[in-house]
Amino acid sequence: MKTLKFRNGDTIHAIGLGTWKAGGNELKKAVKEALYAGYRHIDTAKNYGNEEIIGEALAEVFAEGKIFREDVFITSKLWNDSHAEGQVIPALQESLKKLQLDRLDLYLIHWPVAFRHGVDFPKKPEDYLTPEDAPIIKTWRQMEQAKNLGLTRHIGVSNFSEKKLRELVEKATIKPEMNQVELHPLLQQNKLLEYCNSEDILVTAYSPLGSGDRSKAMKADDEPNMMDIEILKEIARDRSATVAQVLIAWHNHRGCAAIPKSTTKDHIISNFRAADVELEESDMKKIAKLDRNYRYINGKFFEESSRGYDNLYDE
């Protein structure tokens, strides 16, 4: 398995298990199946509402004595209602309690967007805090404190544009160590990836397969299905792989981690085996031509607030 290396030498598997939209016994079983299949990178978030289930699965697997806590890299994320002063560390501690852990491996600011405390998702503009009300650098100072306290080994961000990341890097005492963003052949984000590489910031791709199982309300009527793109199907046939495996391998060949979500044992194993798929330079050139800056997660649900988040991705 390819690994990515943090500045301190810690490593993270380039293929992890994504858990957004998953829950209940189905997720509990999936986490166990993933660990048994060789996964050592699990991604979750407070907002996913599944930290307790994942915590139960982890505790049960660790109790078996064959896979140990130190073997598994676990990421969670700060939700948007806990950006203000004094709220980050309690939120992290709540996640640790649910996950039955004494520390995380990576804690991320989920979005560069702030809500009033206790607001799960805003229903009116007043539910938001503006960027002036809750400056991201003040949230980041608390993330730095959490790392210094040993509550998490690494800290980073998610859904940050190059512009927002540059602004944070300029002010940070501890530079972000990871940026988790939507990334796939239709949204290649080459400039952002180049910047992250230049600053030694690792990148994790979410929705690497297109997130086809997200809610209908989040989908466009005519959105593309990456599984049906002929170039990808041709490459998959040439490499004796599935399209999903080609997509995951593409990220790994670019030096990024990917966190495909699945709760089906066969798919979990198949996704993990993407680590063995070798893409040729010619394959990478063909895939490079697919870029069209298409977002499956377009962030419009925040931009409608008109509270300072009207150009979330700075495009």
Image (cartoon, helix red, strand yellow):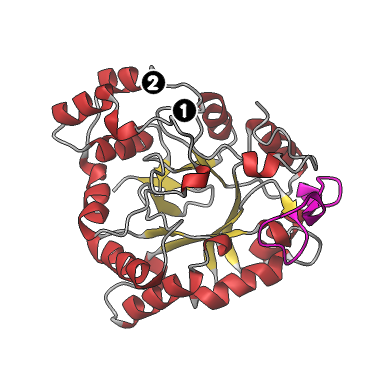
Q: Which residue is mark 1?
A: 188
Q: Main secondary structure of the magenta part?
A: loop
Residue 120 in magenta? yes
Residue sitting at x 77%, y 42%? 171
Residue sitting at x 68%, y 50%? 174
Q: Residue 190 placed where, x, y %? A: 50, 25
Q: Which residue is mark 2?
A: 290
Left or right? Give the position of 178 relative to 272.
right
Quadrant of the image occupied by residue 209: top left
Q: Can you see residue 102? A: no
Q: Residue 307 placed where, x, y %? A: 80, 43
Q: Residue 269 placed where, x, y %? A: 22, 54
Left or right? Give the position of 195 relative to 11.
right
Left or right? Give the position of 98 relative to 150.
left
In the image shown, does 226 or 197 lie closer to the viewer?
226
Left or right? Give the position of 138 relative to 64.
right
Secondary structure under tag 1 reads: loop
Q: Residue 103 placed where, x, y %? A: 55, 70
Q: Can you see residue 254? A: yes
Vertical order, 63 against 29 (above or below): below
* Part of the protein shown in magenta: 115-138
Residue 96 in magenta? no
In the image shown, does 183 or 141 lie closer to the viewer?
183
Name the amino acid, label 2: Leu
Tag 2 or tag 1, which sits nearer the N-term? 1
Residue at the far right in the pictured view: 132
Residue at the far bottom in the pictured view: 63
Q: Dot 2, crowdedness within 10 Å: few (<14), some or many (≥20)?
A: some
Is the C terminus in the top left, top right, bottom left or bottom right quadrant? top right
> Do labels 1 and 2 touch, CB within 8 Å?
yes
Residue sitting at x 21%, y 42%? 276
